[in-house]
Image (cartoon, rainbow, N blue to C red):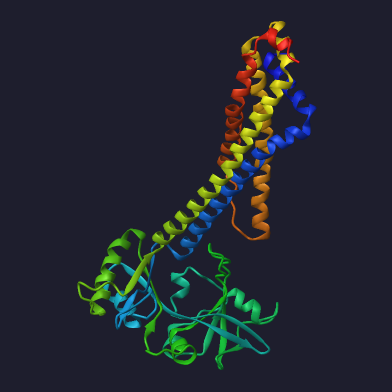
Amino acid sequence: MSFLWLTILSALRILRRNPLRAGLTMLGIIIGIGAVVAMVSLGQGATASVQAEIASLGTNVMIIVPGATTVGGVRGGLGSISTLTVDDAEDIEKKVASVTTVMYATRSVLQVIRENKNWSTIVLGTTPVFPDIRSWPIAQGNFFTQSDMDSAAKVVVLGKTAAQNLFEPGEEVVGSELRIRNVPLRVIGVLTSKGQSITGQDQDDFVVLPFSTAERKVQGTKFLGTVGIILVATQTRYEIPAVVADIKELLRARHHLTASEEDDFTIRTMEDIAKTIAGTSRTMMLMLMGIASISLIVGGIGIMNILLVSVTERTREIGLRMAVGAKRAHILLQFLIEAIIMTAIGGALGVGAGIGIARLLTTMIGWPTIISPEAVVIAFLFSLIVGLFFGLYPANKASKMNPIEALHYE
């Protein structure tokens, strides 16, 4: 057998002498590596969810919302006063080049009643292009048409969650009637499910009405034609900067804003939102990984301490090995291998624990996680580096012992 293999076998026998001490020594490494793998999995899962959510809305879509306003010297926050109108949206569609689709909407949280059931949900009054600009297909029935919009038809389309809470399984949804603020509405369709957003909000918990129906018959408004949000789609994402500039110029002119006045609207692109959310997720992940790294350092210090104790306990053994011809490199290698084996076992157990925690979070809480093979390999290799680094001092101390003094050690 080669010297290296014999050294590995010897190290394993020594660790087996006191399995409890070895296990407690590896605990810091297991916790640290497990936490790192779990955090990276959560971070990558969150990033993938953000990308999927943005992709579902489209990277060529921008959102316009009412901005901060000042009335009578009182400064209001974003959306405190609706400064956007249907005419604004229609002008954008007509006058801004490269714009393909414009959707506007108004939003309220209201009680929806069907027979003996009721459900408080978001009521969205919008336009017939909603399924196209939001990439949201219909699962049952149909979406309302421009004719429904023009006549303020009393029709409604349900999100999946709203439908599940208002109807029993197997019950016919399309064609049924429900009421919002005592206004009878006929259900003409049910949207497909999109599940939770990255912020944990149920995207399917809403109902959709024609904007005219919502404004005139259901939600009500102080000023007809005001909207809470405008979505604008361009042909490609590369045209967005130019379109944003054109929309700003058009809206400032329509709202009669002087050069010294700030915009009373805010334009957000999907890429900006994606970068903000991804940046927040990355920062949180790095913070949590930093905390997890402390466990690795503590684990490494624990390994160094145990090896120092082991060097003291095996002083006579070290002296005997040197007396029969063992070189300094052999003693150094012996203790380094012991440290690396402990961290390798701890790293493998930590990787398993991290994968298990990630799967558990997905199953129990629904948090998206993605197990990255690269992260697993890097975490495991890092555990070996920790063992090598913290094992170097005890190994060096053992290899520098004087054989005669070691043999006489009591």
Q: Residue at x 65, y 46 (%)?
A: 355
- Quarter in which the N terminus is drawn: top right
Tell whether 165 sits left or right of 271.
Answer: right
Q: Is residue 98 above or below residue 178?
A: above
Would you say 304 lies left or right of 181 here?
right
Quarter assignment of residue 223: bottom left
Quarter of the C terminus within the rendering: top right
The location of residue 322, given as percent across then percent down, is 69, 9
Residue 401 x %, y %: 64, 13
Please indicate, yes or no, whether residue 326 appears anywhere in the rendered image. Answer: no
State which quadrant residue 274 falls in.
bottom left
Q: Going by the picture, which residue comes out furthest to the top? A: 324
The residue that appears at 61% across and 36% down in the rendered structure is 380
| Residue ranking furthest to the left | 259
Seen in the image, is 338 located left or right of residue 381? right
Residue at 63% x, 87% y: name it: 114
**Residue 96, position in %: x, y?**
27, 71
Residue 23 visible from this viewpoint: yes
| Residue 101, position as x, y percentages in the image | 37, 72
User: Is 105 situated above or below 16?
Assistant: below
